[in-house]
């Protein structure tokens, strides 16, 4: 594996050189800046920009001075609870500024944080909580009851809402080092259980160094964060903002909805935002004219394969002065490749590349024996760097299998990604999918083995295999094929209800296909390529099919069928049992708004997840025809809802339909 050469061809270098904030206030993030701890760098920035907005979620705003004070108070509370440094501390909050304050507090107290997503099933969260070996969990009043469910015997819970405001808010000035552990994030694991990826502070600082200089981040930037704090992607943008004096602007797409995302990008003047490809497609498909989001100078895509259609959407609908950046990254490596696209560049005739090298991270393509492949051949992407994850938390065997020492005796290590790639003659990398069966669903990493493991636990399932297939709009979705132990075949509704108690929404298959036997290869293994394409007819549900009775129901049924890629939909069929999810729900609402010109809140689908119920809502509101300029406020009712009310609606729908939302 050769040393890294950070060469960019002239056209790529030209686009990159234009990636500046209009203010022109970019200050280079120096190599020397990574030779310190994250708290040291943050405190320097907080002292430099005390009155700038550090983190914001709607009206909930913290300046750098306020964020530093609060995190210092929480850090002192942590120190009073833990006897020694370097301990994991679990964090259970919403997508709000308190989570940011808690993250900084854990690092300031010389410990490492373990973020938990409250939308995950309790059993999954409980596994993470036990596996992390944390003895302390930080939370707030809203999530305190859930924290009590997760807390093992002897585990202490601290509600930061109850902290004494008189606790000292001065910096702690502990002796912290870049090699101190920073965090553990849990991802879907090949063993059927989530695995924790451990990073140190040096890795985070180096990532900030690379991202800041590559994208010319400055204190005037307003960096949007859509990713869950329990994902590795959130870490990159969280610290890239806070260690440069920029503003971190939080938005929870799952609860706020697609239309409000569009308005949020405009209202908040977001200048940089990383989207899952699925969300990006939903957003751009909802636009009607060119030149949208003039403040959004950088659009980043890296969760799934990007197509030429995605690039075309960028050129058609987004502001011509913006830049599209395509990334290749993993939880273990952070960004390892990037590709810049501008609004006037030439289109590729085939797939969109993931691009050229990132400083400090080189790659080789390896064959099945671990040797480099011949030029022009596909191989597994192996990353060589000093800045890789420390390993997998409490999984030394897996760490040794995936993280290899430098055969030349250097201080770099090699990480085997499991991704396949093809190197073009000029050093540009093409991504060729996964070596194993880990896939991306709506931007979330899913290990198919974990889905299969839980599906096999159903009393009527004999065997199962799960694959990812793309639908008509090129979105990956999970299809579960199964054989049954008896003549009694479980319905789709029953299987979803069973899985929703164990897995988050994105890991639940969109379709379930009953087979007499699973196809096998000559070697006796399941032949995944021989699995039939799922039919487009309505799945077997607990509810009997009832055809539309009115023109209104017929119109809605056609909208649902088109978005869900089904031949027909019954008026009493539950949207989520049909394979629908939160992003698909926003598309339904958008289509209904366009068709009927009504102001219809996003929560309407959660309140009325059948055609018959939605038809009744529309009939009751048919006189509320909105003027074109008023359609942008169709989610006012959702905006006025509190977090508790939103969670209540989702919980009620989960109870009815067996639906769960989740992030990785």
Image: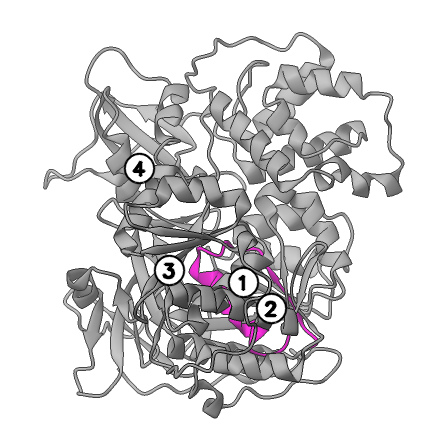
Q: Quadrant of the N terminus?
A: bottom left
Q: According to the image, label 2 marks what residue?
A: 67
In the image, residue 635 sits, relative to residue 24, either above or below, namely above
Which mark lies nearer to you, 3 or 4? 3
Q: Is residue 169 visible?
A: yes
Q: Nearer the viewer, residue 588 or 213?
A: 213
Instruction: Return the x and y of residue 454 as percentages of the image width and height.
Output: 27, 34
Which mark lies nearer to you, 2 or 1? 2
Q: CA distance from mark 3 to mark 2?
A: 19 Å
Q: Quadrant of residue 42?
A: bottom right
What residue appears at the point 46 percent right and 69 percent down from the top-left corner? Answer: 76
Look at the image and name its color scheme.
one colour
Give the mark nearest the N terminus, 3 or 4: 3
Under tag 4, what secondary structure?
strand
Pointers 3 and 4 in contact (C-beta within 8 Å): no
Which mark lies nearer to you, 2 or 4? 2
Mark 2 Cα within 10 Å, few/some/many (few <14, many 20+)?
many
Q: Which residues are the magenta region?
A: 220-246
Q: According to the image, label 3 marks what residue?
A: 89
Pointers 1 and 4 in contact (C-beta within 8 Å): no
Mark 1 Cα within 10 Å, few/some/many (few <14, many 20+)?
many
Q: According to the image, label 1 marks what residue?
A: 100
Under tag 3, what secondary structure?
strand
Q: According to the image, label 4 marks what residue?
A: 466
Per the image, is 244 magenta? yes
In the image, residue 641 sits, relative to residue 624, either above or below, namely below
Under tag 1, what secondary structure?
helix
Under tag 2, what secondary structure?
helix
Q: Quadrant of residue 647?
A: top right
Q: Nearer the viewer, residue 637 or 19?
A: 637
Q: CA distance from mark 2 to mark 1?
A: 8 Å
């Amino acid at each position: 594996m050769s040393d890294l050469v950070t060469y960019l061809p002239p056209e790529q270098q030209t686009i990159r050189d234009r990636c500046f904030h209009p203010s022109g206030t970019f200050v280079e993030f120096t190599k020397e800046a990574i030779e310190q701890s994250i708290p040291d760098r943050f405190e320097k920035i907080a002292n430099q920009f005390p009155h700038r907005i550090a983190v914001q979620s709607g009206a909930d705003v913290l300046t750098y001075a306020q964020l530093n004070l609060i995190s210092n108070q929480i850090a002192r509370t942590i120190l009073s609870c833990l006897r020694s440094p370097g301990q994991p501390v679990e964090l259970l909050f919403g997508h709000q500024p308190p989570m940011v304050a808690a993250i900084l507090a854990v690092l300031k107290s010389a410990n490492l944080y373990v973020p938990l997503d409250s939308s995950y099933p309790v059993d999954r969260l409980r596994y993470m909580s036990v596996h992390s070996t944390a003895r302390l969990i930080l939370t707030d009043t809203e999530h305190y009851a859930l924290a009590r469910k997760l807390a093992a015997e002897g585990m202490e819970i601290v509600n930061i809402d109850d902290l004494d405001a008189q606790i000292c808010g001065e910096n702690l000035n502990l002796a912290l080092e870049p090699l101190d552990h920073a965090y553990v994030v849990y991802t879907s694991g090949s063993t059927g259980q989530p695995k924790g990826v451990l990073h140190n502070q040096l890795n985070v600082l180096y990532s900030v160094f690379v991202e800041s200089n590559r994208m010319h981040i400055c204190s005037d930037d307003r960096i949007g964060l859509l990713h869950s704090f329990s994902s590795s992607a959130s870490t990159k943008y969280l610290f890239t903002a806070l260690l440069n004096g920029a503003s971190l602007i939080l938005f929870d797409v799952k609860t706020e909805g697609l239309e409000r995302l569009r308005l949020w990008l405009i209202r908040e003047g977001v200048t940089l935002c990383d989207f899952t490809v699925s969300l990006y497609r939903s957003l751009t498909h909802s636009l009607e004219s060119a030149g949208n989001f003039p403040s959004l100078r950088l659009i980043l895509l890296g969760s799934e394969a990007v197509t030429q259609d995605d690039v075309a959407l960028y050129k058609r609908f987004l502001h011509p002065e913006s830049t599209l950046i395509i990334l290749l990254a993993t939880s273990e490596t952070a960004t390892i490749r990037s590709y810049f696209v501008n609004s006037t560049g030439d289109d590729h005739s085939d797939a969109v590349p993931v691009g050229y090298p990132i400083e400090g991270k080189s790659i080789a393509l390896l064959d099945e024996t671990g040797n480099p492949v011949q030029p022009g051949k596909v191989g597994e992407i192996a990353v060589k760097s000093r800045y890789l994850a420390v390993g997998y938390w409490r999984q030394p065997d897996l760490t040794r299998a995936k993280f290899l020492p430098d055969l030349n005796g250097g201080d770099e290590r090699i990480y085997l990604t499991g991704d396949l790639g093809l190197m073009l003659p000029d050093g540009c990398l093409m991504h060729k999918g996964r070596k194993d069966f880990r896939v991306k669903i709506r931007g979330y990493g899913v290990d198919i083995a974990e889905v299969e493991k839980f599906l096999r636990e159903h009393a009527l399932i004999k065997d199962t295999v799960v694959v990812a297939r793309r639908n008509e709009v090129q979105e990956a979705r999970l299809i579960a094929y199964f054989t049954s132990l008896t003549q009694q075949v479980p319905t789709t509704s029953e299987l979803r209800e069973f899985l929703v108690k164990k897995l988050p929404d994105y890991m639940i298959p969109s379709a379930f296909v009953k087979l007499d036997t699973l196809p096998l290869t000559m070697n006796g293994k399941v032949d995944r390529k021989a699995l039939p394409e799922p039919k487009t007819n309505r799945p077997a549900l607990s509810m009997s099919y009832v055809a539309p009775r009115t023109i209104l129901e017929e119109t809605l049924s056609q909208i649902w069928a088109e978005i869900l890629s089904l031949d027909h939909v019954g008026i009493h069929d539950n949207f989520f049992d049909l394979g629908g999810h939160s992003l698909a729900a926003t598309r339904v609402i958008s289509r209904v708004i366009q068709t009927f010109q009504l102001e219809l809140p996003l929560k309407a689908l959660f309140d009325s997840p059948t055609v018959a119920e939605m038809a009744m809502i529309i009939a009751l509101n048919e006189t509320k025809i909105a003027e074109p300029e008023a359609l942008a406020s169709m989610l006012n009712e959702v905006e006025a809802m509190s977090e508790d009310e939103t969670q209540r609606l989702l919980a009620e729908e989960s109870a009815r339909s067996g639906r769960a939302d989740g992030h990785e």
